[in-house]
Image (cartoon, grey):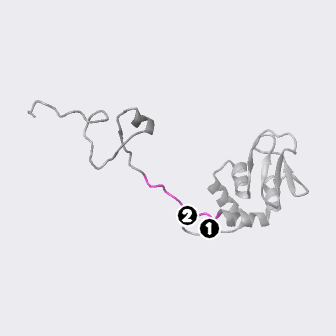
Amino acid sequence: MSSKESPAPLAGGGGAISQEQPMVYSTERDKSEGHSPRLARPVRPIRRGPHIDFAEINRAALAHFLAILRRLLPDGRLIGREYVARNPRRNDHKPGSFKVNVVTGLWADFSSGDRGGDPVSLMAFLGDVSQSRAARLLARMLGVGCGTAP
């Protein structure tokens, strides 16, 4: 090759490609249709906080669930095993479609279709927060620890 000739272009549009970065296809379809591979993006490690023991927080909440419900949904009332209240997340005019089982923790809004299976998911729904944030809030409300380190 003379000094005026350039090397053949590399797959993926040219440019210098490090031998350390693997070539990947976006999808198997791209590979089968003969599209050029792209450089693989470096994988960033996922930052995780301390381990949250959701099961323990849910157990502690169920032991005091009626008191928690009366605090979170003060206009509700107990009918059998269900706490019936208005859904504070929507313009609910009267109680009836939003129910929480005080024994199991299952809850549902039969009007909107929102539902969950434990006190943490209810707290997350009512507070419009993540499950982990809801677990921390509920643990603080109950005066229990969030869990152990992984």
Q: Quadrant of the C terminus?
A: bottom right
Crowd class of label 2 (few under 14; some 14 to 19; many from 20; radius 10 Å): few
Question: Mainly helix, strand or loop, the magenta region?
Answer: loop
| Separation of marks 2 and 1 at Cα, in angstroms | 8 Å
Q: Quadrant of residue 7?
A: top left
Q: Which residue is mark 2?
A: 50
Q: Quadrant of the N terminus?
A: top left
Q: Residue at x 13, y 30 (%)?
A: 5
Depth check: give the residue in front, 114 or 147.
Answer: 114
Q: Residue at x 29, y 50 (%)?
A: 20
Q: Which mark is residue 85?
A: none
Q: Which mark is residue 147?
A: 1
From the viewer's perspective, tell me whether residue 63 is left or right of residue 22. Answer: right
Residue stretch in magenta: 44-53
Q: Secondary structure at mark 2?
A: loop
Depth check: give the residue in front, 139 or 118.
Answer: 118
User: Residue reaching furthest left?
Assistant: 2
Q: Quadrant of residue 119?
A: bottom right
From the viewer's perspective, tell me whether residue 16 is left or right of residue 30. Answer: left
32 w.r.t. 75: above or below: above
Q: Are marks 2 and 1 in contact (CB under 8 Å)?
A: yes
